[in-house]
Amino acid sequence: DAGITQSPRHKVTETGTPVTLRCHQTENHRYMYWYRQDPGHGLRLIHYSYGVKDTDKGEVSDGYSVSRSKTEDFLLTLESATSSQTSVYFCAISDPTRTSGRYEQYFGPGTRLTVT
Amino acid sequence: GENVEQHPSTLSVQEGDSAVIKCTYSDSASNYFPWYKQELGKRPQLIIDIRSNVGEKKDQRIAVTLNKTAKHFSLHITETQPEDSAVYFCAASTAKGNEKLTFGTGTRLTIIP
């Protein structure tokens, strides 16, 4: 597996509390992504980053914010968690500047978040 | 934006038989089509991908075909084995530099021994 880690791996939190998930990579890939995975919906893009301090929204970005201050770290924040944000969150990386495998995305192990 | 539909949602085949999963996409500008395999409790893993300048690609027992005119692509697994049991996702991307993937909703493949 590519050098991608996510923390925490499991979290239970209460409605209304802030939550931050961390994605860390050791591959020096330029792009990083946050997806959520829910039954019947597959993987849906929340936000992505195409460089340090460069981020953009995906299809389900409401209620989420991201930050990328270093190449290796991409943070996903739920400012005020809701039960609808209970999900499995996956981070992914890619690097279109590579000469081979430029379009491939590699996923982290996931974080299971439960909002009660 | 792009919309990817995947069928069937569940598929059961006898061990040794072939399995076919189909996806359609809506954006004619899409030019990159990966397939991911996800075992229970694990991360999605890329198993094969195809670019729009190629009609078919094979890797041992796995093949992907692409029909740009009809905007659909398919995953073919031959001589299925129990370890092929997993959820499979197709995806599409315009690959214009941001490489955003739009995923299908997944197919749960069960291989019956």
Image (tube, helix red, strand yellow):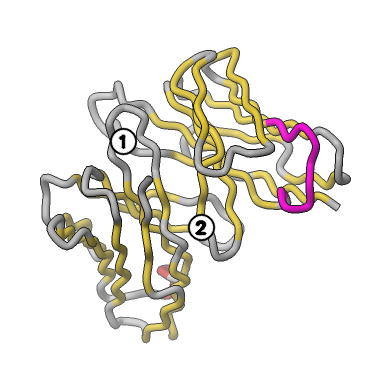
The residue to which callout 1 is attached is: A103
Relative to B9, A84 lies left or right: right
Q: Is A93 drawn above or below residue B101 in the view shown? A: above
**Picture coordinates of residue A31 (x, y %)?**
44, 26
The residue to which callout 2 is attached is: A42
CA neighbours of label 1 inside 10 A, class few (<14), some (14 to 19), many (20+): many
Relative to A80, A31 lies left or right: left
**Picture coordinates of residue A87 (x, y %)?**
68, 52
Relative to A49, B59 lies left or right: left
Q: Secondary structure at mark 2?
A: strand
Q: Which residues are magenta?
A: A77-85
Q: Residue at x 32, y 49 (%)?
A: B92
Q: Residue at x 79, y 41 (%)?
A: A81
CA neighbours of label 2 inside 10 A, class few (<14), some (14 to 19), many (20+): many
Instruction: Report if residue A33 lies within the magenta region.
Output: no
Q: Do the residues bearing badges 2 and 1 touch, measured as CB atoms within 8 Å?
A: no
Q: Chain of mark 2?
A: A
Quarter of the picture containing the N terminus of chain B is top left
**Picture coordinates of residue A33 (x, y %)?**
51, 34
Q: Chain of mark 1?
A: A
Quarter of the picture containing the C terminus of chain B is bottom left
Q: Amino acid at mark 1?
A: Tyr
Q: Is A3 drawn above or below residue A112 in the view shown? A: above
Q: Label 2 vs label 1: CA separation?
A: 20 Å
Q: Amino acid at mark 2?
A: Gly
Q: Nearer the viewer, mark 2 or mark 1?
A: 2
Q: Secondary structure at mark 1?
A: loop
